[in-house]
Amino acid sequence: MSQLLLDKLKARFGERILETSSFRGDEVAVVAPTDWLDVAQFLRDDPACDMSMFIDITVVDYPEREARFDLVLMLYSLHKGHRVRLKTRLADGATVKTVTPLWAAANWFEREVYDMFGVKFEGHPDLRRILMYEEFEGHPLRKDYAADRTQPLVPYRPEAKDKLAPFRADEGMPFGRRDWSPRDDAWKTDDIAHNEEHLAEAIANDPAETR
Amino acid sequence: MEPQDYDIAEDDLALPAEPMRINMGPSHPAMHGTIRMIVDVDGESIKNVDVQIGFLHRGFEKMCERGTWTQVFPYTDRLNYVSPMICNVGFAMAVEKLAGITVPERCQWYRTVLSELSRITDHLTCNGAMAMELGAFTPFLWMMKAREHVWDLLEEETGARMTHSFARIGGMAKPPTPNLKHRVEEVLLAVEDILVECEALLFKNRIFLDRLQGVGAISAAEALQFSWTGPTLRSTGVAYDVRRAHPYLVYDQLEFDIPVGSDGDNFDRYMVRHEEIKQSIRILRQCNKLMPDDGPIDVTDRPEVVLPPKNDVYTTIEGTIQHFKLIMEGAKIPKGEVYSFVEGGNGEFGFFIVSDGSGTPYRVRIRPPCVFTLQGFPRMIRGHMIADIVPTFGSVNMIGGECDR
Amino acid sequence: MGNVKSGQIVLEGSEQGFATTRFDALLNWARKYSLFQYPFVTACCGMEFMSLNGPRFDGLARFGAEAPRFTPRQADLLWVVGTIVQRQAPVLKRVYEQMCDPKYVIAFGTCASCGGFYDNYTTVPGIDKIIPVDVYIPGCPPRPEAVIDGLMLLMDKIASGRRETPAIVKPHNDPVGDRLVTLGKGSPRELEIGPQSRTRDDRPNTPAHAFLPKKAAT
Ligand code: SF4
């Protein structure tokens, strides 16, 4: 049934629909960023599509691609009961028109996409960070943001002890199977040295070890 | 003596007030700990609210990109921690959709039973907390008592009181205990009793009714504009329930009604949840009759995702290797992306998952229903009093873990 | 005549009808039964906190720690219940600073104790990075029984007046036991806090009659 929807989109926009696919009952249409708002508007207003409900908007990050962000918009028709996913590909720093005028619900979710990935929406009424704080630098859900890099707002107490993992910092399960970032690992090696110092000290002080 | 200000209109008595901006939260007893509201008030009536979320952003989505698919389950528990089994089942269903797995019939019944039990705890907690915030402490305690009964049952089944981590890809961690049906019936009777008591306590209480009726009303059109789902949407009169609109598990074989409200005010939201508890009880009774007593729980023909029986792990080399690979590398889920959704405690709880074919999720995104409701909050509260924030916010059932992830 | 040990108080009525004790011991004894709590509830652990208050466990009222005070200025026990993220950290610090001395902090749950399994860019790895903690209650979430244990540990700490080392609620059978290594210079390896320590494995060493009133010394 939703296949009809993709056909309809193709009939209306022709070449401007770059790709369509259907996987496990989920229909996806890919458009260029410039057509984003037009297609979304059509999906909402066309009586046969009638996408009255905004479900979600999110991003999937593929850092090895030139246009690294897949912006995904999910829509649902309350009356017809069908769903569609609209996708576009964005390079870092590229912008796309906001869909807030079409669905008021998109407001916070576009803010979240901006917060987590740094994709900017043109014409958004209030593009602030939503989940992270203003002082936060970078966009944490990008693959190349090191997952364990914190940016504390209050300095930690000097007397607070370091948490010592049961294994050393370079052992145990890696954070993800692939290391996305050719990042500066100096802080990490520092960590290891630091931990080793602690360990040596602990072992020296521990009578159980000398037993 | 005759009152002097006899025929003065109330407007004349009102003192002129400067518009003022006050801060509520993030550590305010009515804000459930993690929401901050900047309220613009004129006198005592609210002009505008800026709702700020994110005080419980724990990096769920980033953490999911870390381990194997199975290691996501504990995190899903802590999304909507009032109905963790629904999140568990929802994630398992999403991964199964991506991998093209259909779980055995008995497992589907079992998942339905656990989800509905979770829904009961969710609505009990929400309604109890809402009553407590209005000063009705006794119903809160009673509902906690009822929840404790359900938790007992869930603990017997899953081993944990609230963070179960019980679903698995292609099945459940354990088959149901032999006396599940008997215990469900026992618990349902206890919960029903408590519901009757709470009704007697609340529904004729003038204060309770006055604080809820007509407060925080919203129309169906506006609710849809904000993409509300779940009990909050149904309270405005739109009968959208995922269980009915897109039946999953065995909901198409079950008979239940979808309670809807008419005004979309706090009282309707309370009543919809109250009624849904009863419908869940009805569903559970039918499950008790229809659920098969034996049969497999895990899929048997997909060794690449399901752990082998423990006996094989210890006695055969294939079993050992398979177990090792599944634990260390994780189940290899085929490349692709799907969106799958269930009816959570707060509405359509969706998982958008992307796999790159390795054992680790490439991206897990959830659709948090209560963010949508919260987004409509300024619209609901505008023009009301500051004190109305408390019951209205309570009726939204904001769950920090799900809202901020 | 009363039998006064350091940090511990045993009151007995004598024939004359009075009791003697050290003033600070009396103060601590009084303090430990009248804790005013400030629940800083953020996350999932809050559900167990509700249960703890609920009819089955009744875990606070029985210990005189029920009355919640939603202004930190009137509270002396801060329950940190749930995950504290970087954005919440200044708030927590401010709440703590607004409390009057003596103030006690209980870290409820693994997240509050050490960050739990949220080891990432946004979570504070334990509230002790920000404020000092008196009692850690591990568990995700801890069962109400464990919390009651933790509250009793805190009461013991208050009574003994020794607050340098934090207390930890241990499991019934501690797999690590005394092999636990505490790191850092000068940190004591023992985490127990005195003769009345209520961690289970210490219990056999504390005879039950130690808690009963003693006969007056002849
Ligand atoms: S310790 Fe566990 S239950 Fe408690 S807040 Fe953290 S994740 Fe939630």
Image: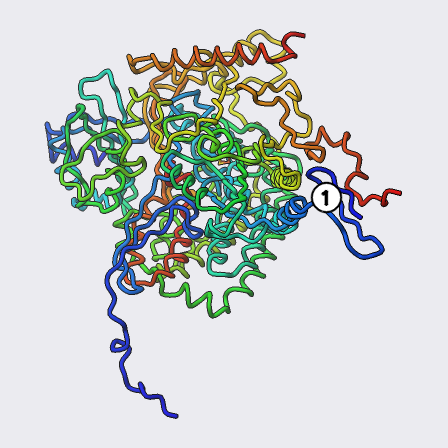
Tell me the quarter of the image containing the N terminus of chain A: top left
Residue at image location 72% in from the left, 33% down from the top: C195
The amino acid beneath tag 1 is Ile
Residue B90 drawn at (x, y percent): 43, 35
Residue A58 drawn at (x, y percent): 27, 32
Q: Is mark 1 within 8 Å of ligand 1?
A: no
Drawn side of residue C98 relative to residue A4, left or right? right
Judge whether B363 appears above or below C6 on screen: above
Q: Which residue is mark 1?
A: C9
| Number of numbered labels in the structure image | 1
Q: Residues within 10 Å of mark 1 (few under 14, many from 20)?
A: many
Most extreme residue toward the bottom, as rendered?
B1
Most extreme residue toward the right, as rendered?
C218
Q: Is residue B243 visible?
A: no
A113, C133: nearer the viewer = C133
Drawn side of residue A109 relative to residue B253, left or right? left
Q: Is residue C205 visible?
A: yes
Residue C174 drawn at (x, y percent): 66, 25
Residue at image location 11% in from the left, 29% down from the top: A16
Drawn side of residue A41 relative to residue C194, left or right? left
B247, A130: nearer the viewer = A130
A24, B392: nearer the viewer = B392
* Chain to which the residue tagged by mark 1 belongs: C
Residue at image location 65% in from the left, 12% down from the top: A208
Image quarter of residue B291: top right
Residue at image location 26% in from the left, 42% down from the top: A108
Could you say whether the residue bearing mark 1 is in a helix, strand or loop? strand
Judge whether B313 appears above or below B86 on screen: above
Residue C136 drawn at (x, y percent): 56, 33
A64, A152: nearer the viewer = A152
Tell me the quarter of the image containing the C terminus of chain A: top right
Q: Which of the colour schemes (rainbow, by chain, secondary structure, one colour) is used?
A: rainbow
